[in-house]
């Protein structure tokens, strides 16, 4: 992070790279703002002040195989020498989404970027838990990114009624799951992908993405979180309509 925030992105196979800058005496909030200015592409210049910058709708640090030292041998070796695994920063815009990998060196690298309309929810899915009786149908396509955007891959479903699974390895959409009502959030663990609807929860197997179970007795909350749930490694908590 730097006081003058010089953006010097360079193109590589994996996307844009934003070089780290010298640390200055900034407040915590100023540092966060400066970092976002460094990594978020902006259509702004002093000669054209009327152009709009990209609008950030949501932002989240993500955890998956890409920075899991227990499932990634290379990261485990790095971690054993004192180096921390990279952070995954996911940024949702009014017209798309970006995923950045930020290692301990501070050199942020763009892993994924699309601009096909607003994204309501997105998750990088962890590799599933498999055994002798269960195989991963999408092993060659992982890591996978689940995205709920305004229009699904088919282009015929209502807004936010479709979840597309993108392969971060090949760039293709490997599966789409459509619903009749809008999706409000996505959650995942190594066993299931949970799709949160207004009064229902739909869970899909993480290996095949076939239907596993439904919960149809959720209480629709009047607050900003329409259907609040919490998903752990083994438990699912939700608000019951009773």
Image (tube, rainbow, N blue to C red):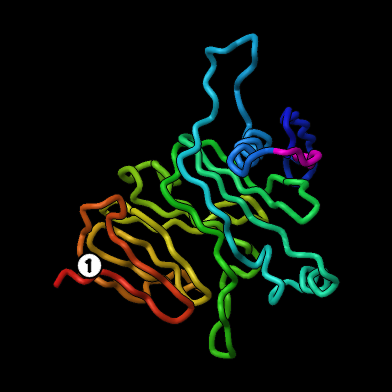
Quadrant containing the N terminus is top right
Where residue 69 sits, quadrant-wise, is: bottom right
Q: Residue at x 63, y 64 (%)?
A: 142
Q: Residue furthest bottom?
A: 132
Total marks shown come to 1
Q: Residue furthest right?
A: 81
Q: Tell me: residue 240, above or below residue 1.
A: below
Where residue 47 sits, quadrant-wise, is: top right
Image position of 145 (left or right of 19): left
Circle 1 sits in a helix, a strand or a loop, which is it?
Answer: loop
Residue 152 on image: x %, y %? 41, 46
Residue at the spot of label 1: 218
Image position of 204 (left or right of 91): left
Residue 113 on image: x %, y %? 61, 42
Tell me, yes or no, whether the highlighted magenta stretch contains residue 145: no
Q: Residue at x 79, y 39 (%)?
A: 21
Can residue 172 be seen at all in this image of the molecule?
Answer: yes
How many residues crowd around disc 1 within 10 Å: few (fewer than 14), some, or many (20 or more)?
A: many
Q: Residue at x 85, y 71 (%)?
A: 81
In the image, the segment drawn in magenta is: 18-25
Residue 60 on image: x %, y %? 53, 52
Between 240 and 156, the residue placed more toward the observer is 240
Q: Residue furthest left?
A: 242
Quadrant containing the C terminus is bottom left
Residue 17 on image: x %, y %? 76, 41
**For the stretch drawn in magenta, what is the main secondary structure?**
loop
Q: Residue at x 54, y 89 (%)?
A: 133
Between 233 and 178, the residue placed more toward the observer is 233
């Amino acid at each position: 992070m730097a006081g003058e925030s010089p953006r010097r992105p360079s193109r590589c196979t994996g996307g844009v790279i934003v070089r780290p800058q010298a640390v200055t005496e900034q407040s915590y909030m100023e540092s966060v703002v400066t970092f976002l200015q460094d990594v978020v592409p902006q259509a702004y210049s002093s000669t054209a002040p009327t152009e709009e910058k990209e609008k950030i709708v949501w932002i989240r640090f993500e955890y998956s195989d890409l920075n899991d030292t227990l499932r990634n041998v290379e990261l485990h070796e790095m971690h054993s020498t004192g180096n921390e695994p990279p952070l995954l920063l996911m940024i949702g815009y009014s017209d798309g989404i970006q995923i950045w990998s930020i290692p301990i060196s501070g050199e942020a690298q763009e892993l994924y970027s699309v601009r096909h309309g607003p994204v309501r929810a997105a998750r990088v899915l962890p590799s599933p838990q498999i055994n002798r009786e269960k195989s991963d149908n999408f092993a060659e396509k992982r890591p996978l990114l689940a995205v709920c955007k305004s229009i699904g891959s088919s282009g015929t479903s209502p807004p936010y009624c479709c979840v597309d699974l993108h392969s971060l390895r090949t760039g293709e959409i490997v599966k789409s799951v459509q619903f009749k009502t809008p999706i409000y959030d996505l959650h995942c663990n190594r066993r299931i992908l949970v799709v949160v609807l207004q009064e229902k929860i739909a869970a899909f197997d993480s290996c095949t993405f076939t239907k596993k179970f439904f919960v149809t007795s959720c209480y629709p909350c009047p607050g900003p979180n329409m259907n609040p749930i919490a998903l752990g490694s083994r438990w699912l908590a939700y608000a019951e309509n009773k």
